[in-house]
Amino acid sequence: MTAGDFRVYQPALPEVCTRDPQRMALAADADGRCEIFTWQAATGTARQVTDSRDGTLHCAIDADARVWWFAEDRNGRGRWYFEEFEGGGPRRPGLTGLRPGLPHGLAVSGAGTVAIGLGDGRGTTVHIGTPGGPARPVATVDGPALLAGISPSGGLLALSGPAGSERAVTLLTCAGAPLDRLSGVPGRLWALGFAPSTAGTELLLVQECGPESAAHEQEDVRQRTADGPANGRYRLASWRPGSGLQPHGWCCFDTEITGRWYPDGRRVLIRQDRHGRSTLAVADLDRHTLTPVPTPPGTVLDAAPHPGDDVHYLWTDTATPPRMRSTAGTRLPALATLPGRAPGRHGELWTDGPDGPVHTLLSRPDAGPGGCPPLVFLVHGGPADHARDAYDPEVHSLVASGFAVARVNYRGSTGYGPRWRAAFGEGVGLTQVADLVAVRADLLRRGLAREDAIGLWGTSWGGYLALLALGTRPGLWQAGVAVKPVADCAAAHRSGTPALRALDERLFGGTPDTVPERYARSSPLHYAAEVRAPLLVVAATLDAKCPPGQVRGYLTALREAGVAHESLWLETGHDGYTGAHHMTVLTRAVRFLDRHLRRSGTAHRAPRPSVGGVSGETGESVVPGLRGPIPDAVRRQNRRSSHAEGHHPQRPARG
């Protein structure tokens, strides 16, 4: 099988032109890479816009149907470009005179003013101008910040900082003059964009409220326990010039929400993530009403309202790949799909825990001969994220290959309220490992797992938890896979991005210099010599979120301790845009787990040489010795839908 046989899908809706909703732009598959396409809904035709070696992900379409995309190198730095919807002309720089930078926001007003946020690894500078014209810098912010929007008139800008900081949201004029600063203390605050109406200027926000909000900022995360304050909530809020922040107290939810304006600027489409699933509702800001939008049970990955009360949404469940749907019947692009449902039996269970029951999504192979199949804990990243009742090719591949899969929404996950998300009472990482251990014991009690055939597989922060579990509870696991993980908390902090350093300092209550013992206690490096199970570590040479240096240090510690392990290096950043990279990891991981979980006994302590890998390595579509094919719909883990927690584009989560 060649790279051209792989397909990728980007689980996000097309961007829609507000003045001509039949014209859209989206990221989709192009011979195994994510690239940008136009979509003309009236005719059902697509046109490929970009063609880059490593793929293109970020795109937009403005009111004049100009298609925008961010052309980046393997380090994630680049520039915004645009061209006309019909094509045929040259691509043009969004603004001229700009050096390559990190994409920290693009906004185009109805009046034709473009604002571009570019990061340099230390801070963010916002530039404005007319499309294709010279750039004029208007604001520079140190530390993590993103451009959250521009008002329809082009007169105001909104910048988002850390949601729990004094500068959660900053309002500026387009001359750079500060107009207002909204604090995320005690309740964290997220900006979701300006109302599209030109009748007035109104910014939509989500605000964390309730007793836990104050406790969240006043206590170290590591000190919170089940005896803490009652659960908080999330509510919509608005900001207007001269009126300040106005909470909508009637529009509250017990778990995370996001919102998007309807074209009339008086209604908001709300998506709520709750207990691994999603619902939609329409909030009328004038009538103070909430009206549900019917959707099938499962997960809505993204949703957006459009003219004519049309709602586009991206729906999935564990057995069904994402499907784009329109409430008005608008023709939308087709995504990679399957001839039928993904194999397996899919359910859930709840396990008692110190801060409340722990929710697990459990997938098992279809009934067959023999006892319990080997079990893999597929550990989600974040930490501000959660496992969903949503299609995942890793789940599909494992179940089709005869494994059971447990996806645990451990403490710290989103979708269960602010108190659950803030519950780190046993320490960063250690709290989450305790939940994995508790669910493991519960599965054994229920007869759903075998004690001698349980493995771990995690990516990014999930990979961090896999390493930490293997080192702190070494007798419980028979194999582990950690993909692009945090392996040394202190080293990752020192070489990470401003947003990730801010996240670490919030979780640990300080820097590695001020609270070194906390970083050491939660670092997999501290326990590397204790690992007993065979381990596969996958890392990326250009990873800015989980830098390669700290992974190399961990691998050195494993070698010096004589721990059996393998390693695979990819020439990519943290997020790859090609199917071949994802298939390389998927194939290698499934083979590794099959080799170690289908045999009896545990790993030997003899040292084992690391195995290198080459970017673009593929492998066969059917893994020898396994019971089913690896599906060719390959997951992209960078989700772009706005969310107050795990899916907000401003979240500094590692993945």
Image (cartoon, rainbow, N blue to C red):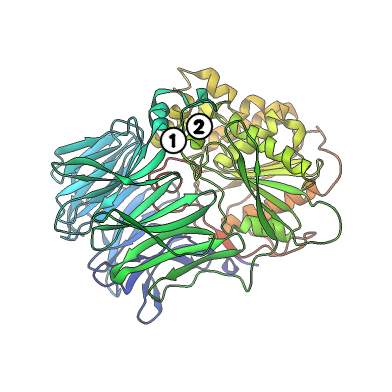
> Picture coordinates of residue 418 (x, y %)?
45, 37
Q: Are marks 1 and 2 in contact (CB under 8 Å)?
A: yes
Q: Residue at horizontal 69%, vertical 51%?
A: 405
Q: Which residue is mark 1?
A: 500
Q: Which residue is mark 2?
A: 492
| Kind of residue sitting beneath label 1 | Leu
- How many dots with numbers? 2
User: What is the crowding at mark 1: few (fewer than 14 residues within 10 Å), some, or many (at least 20)?
Assistant: many
> Picture coordinates of residue 171 (x, y %)?
20, 41
> Picture coordinates of residue 452 (x, y %)?
82, 41
The quarter of the picture where residue 471 lies is: top right
The reply to whether residue 532 is in sight is: no
Identify which residue, 299 or 351, lies in the foreground: 351
Q: CA distance from mark 1 to mark 2?
A: 9 Å
Q: Residue at horizontal 17%, vertical 57%?
A: 130
247 left or right of 510?
Answer: left
Q: Secondary structure at mark 1?
A: helix
Quadrant (top left, top right, bottom left, bottom right) of the N terminus: bottom right
| Kind of residue sitting beneath label 2 | Ala
Vertically, is 619 above or below 439? below
